[in-house]
Image: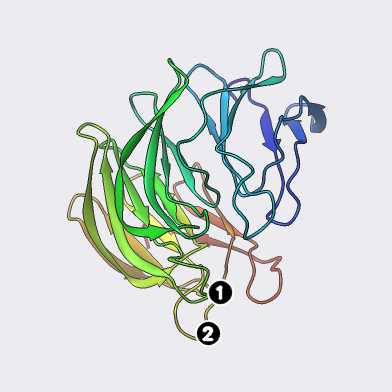
Amino acid sequence: LQNGKVLVAGGTGYSPTTAAELYDPAAGNWTTTGAMSTARAQHTATLLPDGRVLTTGGGSTFGLPPPGPSAELYDPVTGTWTGTGGLGTNRFAHTATLLPNGKVLAIGGYNNGALTSTELFDPSTGTWTAAGTLAKARQLHTATLLPNGKVVVAGGQGSLVFNDAVSKVELYDSASGTWTGAGTMATARYAHTTTLLPDGRVLVAGGYGTNSPYNLSSAELYDPVAGTWTTTSAMHNARVTATATLLPNGSVLVVGGSAGNSLSSVEQYNPAS
């Protein structure tokens, strides 16, 4: 949040919940805050320019459609949630990206099948509008806002088939509202991490792949200027659903994840070397 606190809301794919909590890094403690009106899992939470947080979609149970095309707004001043315009399409395991114009782009996800649809939320009106169609249906993908205002959408799962990973990459131009292809990754993957580096490149690491062993340690770099993908050194451990955080020194810290079993190990990627 803009006040420096961290908002955690909702639950996992197996345990949707309405509960929300706040972490205060200055005090080092957690406190409860207002609950959402709808239990959510595999939803999104996006910080808006006015300080509110937009949550969208979310499944009621893993593998089932969301309870409704709902969206809610959290007000950190009052600690309460209010409903806002609902998505045009129910979805979970999607992405929601804040654009330079203040709107939020919801991409893909799942609802009785992986989705190609995308939508735009306008906080000034509280309404959603269609934002074009992906060339490839995907869920559990990543969407990264580039310095040029475009959004690169990488990977994803094309269906509920375990190894149906996507290699095709797509770009959304927030200025023109259009979608174009952005090449293919060397390795199809989903449930991976994506990190925007200080030099404008994008690091993609880990995830599930198409061939055994399905847990991936490989990593790739996307250069938005050249529009190309190149492989970089692999992680020491294969990781699925890990976290990747850009550190102040420009390196990327990758934590945990799964490789059949949950991992406690941590790795650091140095873009310079």
Which residue is denoted by mark 1 in the rendering?
Answer: 238
Q: Position of residue 244 (x, y in %)?
A: 54, 54
Q: Quadrant of residue 76?
A: top right
Q: Nearer the viewer, residue 38 or 141?
A: 38
Circle 1 residues within 10 Å: few <14, some 14–19, many ≥20: many
Q: Position of residue 253 (x, y in %)?
A: 55, 55
Against 124, residue 19 (above or below) is below
Circle 2 residues within 10 Å: few <14, some 14–19, many ≥20: few
Q: Amino acid at mark 2?
A: Pro
Q: Position of residue 105 (x, y in %)?
A: 40, 37
Q: Of the two numbered discs 1 and 2 on the same chain, state the one appearing first in sequence.
A: 2
| Tag count | 2
Furthest-bottom residue in view?
Answer: 212
Residue under the point 32% across and 42% down: 146
Residue under the point 52% across and 30% down: 86
Q: Position of residue 10 (x, y in %)?
A: 70, 41
Tell me whether circle 1 and circle 2 mark residues in contact (CB < 8 Å).
Answer: yes
Mark drawn on residue 213: 2
Quadrant showing the N terminus = top right
Mark in the foreground, 1 or 2? 2
Quadrant showing the C terminus = bottom left
Q: Nearer the viewer, residue 259 or 110?
A: 110
Q: Amino acid at mark 1?
A: Ala
Against 157, residue 175 (above or below) is above
Q: Quadrant of residue 184?
A: bottom left
Tell me the distance, in whole angstroms, between the alpha carbons under discs 1 and 2. Answer: 9 Å
